[in-house]
Image (cartoon, rainbow, N blue to C red):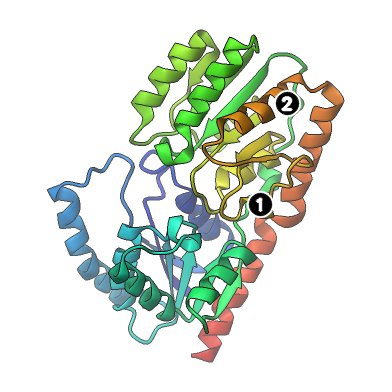
Amino acid sequence: MRVLITAPSLDHQDNVSGISTMISSIIESAGCQYTHFTAGRRDSDKFDLGWLATQLKLPLDFRRAISTAKPQIIHINTAFEPRAIIRDFVLSKLAGSRPIVLHVHGGRFVMQDFTNGKLAWAAEQLLRSASRVIVLSDAERDRLLKRTPGLNISVLPNAVSAAKLPLAERPWGTKNIIYLGRLDESKGLSDIVEACRVLVAQGFTFRFSCYGAGPDKGKFIASMKEVLGTNFHYGGVVAGRYKIRALAEADVFLMPSRFEGLPMALLEAMASGCIPIVSNRGSIPTVVEDGRNGFLVEPGDLTEIVGKLKFLLSEGEPGWEEYRRNARETVVERFDIGGYVEKLRSIYLELASAK
């Protein structure tokens, strides 16, 4: 099966992106003949004339990629954000008669209403161009169908290889909170800073490890160093065994995002035995059951975020072990890459046979 698949750069030094991580896993595991077409900016890119020139050239490059790869399926990975919607609307028009799999990886306008009529029109046209739309949860499917009836939608939550993320033993002692992902204010970075400030003022002792990159990296690192001093560690961008080790050394995964899809970092952290404290947004509630395998918070609710952290930091060892075990079992049983690629291959085969 020949598949032309779009995604940002798959080099983890270029992109701290859940989409890139997921697409790398698909290419590695799904057993198809993939051609990767780079669509999406790198973390270091600025919205300048150079970026604009690249976007204007993208349709021509995409047409050439189709001509060279001769794909049976075109798999477009997108996020429901303004620039991504416009970009992928244009790309979808170049697919010709080839079946399109449109894979929606969250974004604010999956669950929120559009406020711009032209953007809403482009999103609807993009959705209707697809032979199959893939979303991350039943809630996202229901939302899109309510807004755009008649779509052929499959629910396929993100997945990880749990076998590559062993449940490490953690010695009882000072706890280590981890943030792993894009350093952007939309991820709730200011809430993290203020929550840590409150905890320190109330006498709690903990370490905080941060891994990732993004536009707000400098401001976040400076603020966390001010609050935590030597108890804060920034480790840059990590992948492979370095990411596995970072997660194995952490106890709590904290990400109080303003909006989300289904973060790959969340699944990786839970598979490693980290206890998540994450926002009650997007598809996250389909993974995290509050009080059983982690904790849900409302974005921007500092009192709730601090309260959940205080509860965990005050919890005894038996409680921690139960949360860790439940977190890993959730990923192993429902979000492992093996079942994921089987379902994806079935979608490809169905669409190719129908054509």
Q: Residue at x 48, y 74 (%)?
A: 147
Image coordinates of residue 207 in percent, x first then y, are: 59, 17
Q: Residue at x 35, y 64 (%)?
A: 85
- Quarter residue 67 falls in: bottom left
Q: Residue at x 38, y 38 (%)?
A: 13
Crowdedness near tag 1: few (<14), some (14–19) or many (≥20) residues, C-alpha within 10 Å: some
Q: In terms of secondary structure, where does tag 1 sit?
A: helix
Q: Residue at x 51, y 9 (%)?
A: 230
- Quarter residue 177 falls in: top right
Q: Nearer the viewer, residue 110 or 128?
A: 110
Q: Nearer the viewer, residue 169 or 255?
A: 255
Residue highlighted by disc 2: 312
Taking the image as shown, residue 68 lies to the left or right of residue 286, namely left
- Quarter residue 3 falls in: bottom left
Q: Which mark is residue 313?
A: none
How far apart marks 2 and 1 lie (CA) works out to 19 Å
Image coordinates of residue 195 in percent, x first then y, are: 55, 24
For residue 31, say whether it is visible.
no
Q: Which mark is residue 285?
A: 1
At label 2, the amino acid type is: Leu
For residue 270, say whether it is visible.
yes
